[in-house]
Amino acid sequence: MAEISIGMKRALGEQLNYDPEQSPDAEKWLELPESERLVLISEYHRKQGLAYGEGPSGEHLHVVCHCIIENQLAMGVPDVQYDLEAMLREQISRHEAIHQLCRELSVDIFKEMQKRVQ
């Protein structure tokens, strides 16, 4: 994935970083093009040396799932916010909670696809 554009950093007047342990500013997050959000998430994982799926397709899927959940949180989707807050109350890290929400999203997508195949 490409680096985040210098123009986007200047437009927002700051060095942007993504940290899944911190909620991004919802308004600024949603102002970013989707491609820039994906780059930020990918950069975080790469800089941390975190494993996130096998091969390029596994990496991309992991980053896309992170982005979907962060987008839903920034948009204020009630069920996603509720589930995140419940996991945080159980002392689950925000990053691991995002992974759990990604797993739930994957199950929902799979079930929906199964309906369409039948």
Image (tube, grey):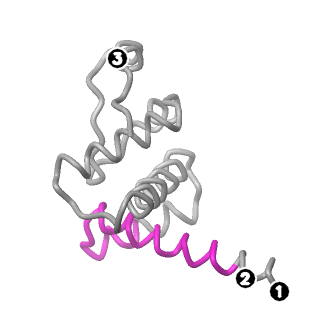
Our reading of the magenta stretch's main secondary structure is helix
Q: Are marks 2 and 1 in contact (CB under 8 Å)?
A: yes
Q: Is residue 16 rendered to the left or right of residue 56? A: left
**Viewer-closest of 32 and 75:** 32
The three-letter code of the residue at mark 3 reads Ile
Q: Quadrant of residue 29?
A: top left
Mark sitting on residue 6 = 3
In the displayed structure, 117 sits above or below 43; it is below
- Is residue 98 a member of the stretch shown in magenta? yes
Q: Quarter of the image containing the N terminus?
A: top left
What residue is at 32 percent from the left and 67 percent from the top? 88
- Where does the image place residue 23, in percent across and percent down from the top left? 35, 47
Q: Which residues are magenta?
A: 85-111
Q: Is residue 59 rendered to the left or right of residue 33? A: left
What residue is at 44 percent from the left and 55 percent from the top? 60
Residue, disc 2: 114
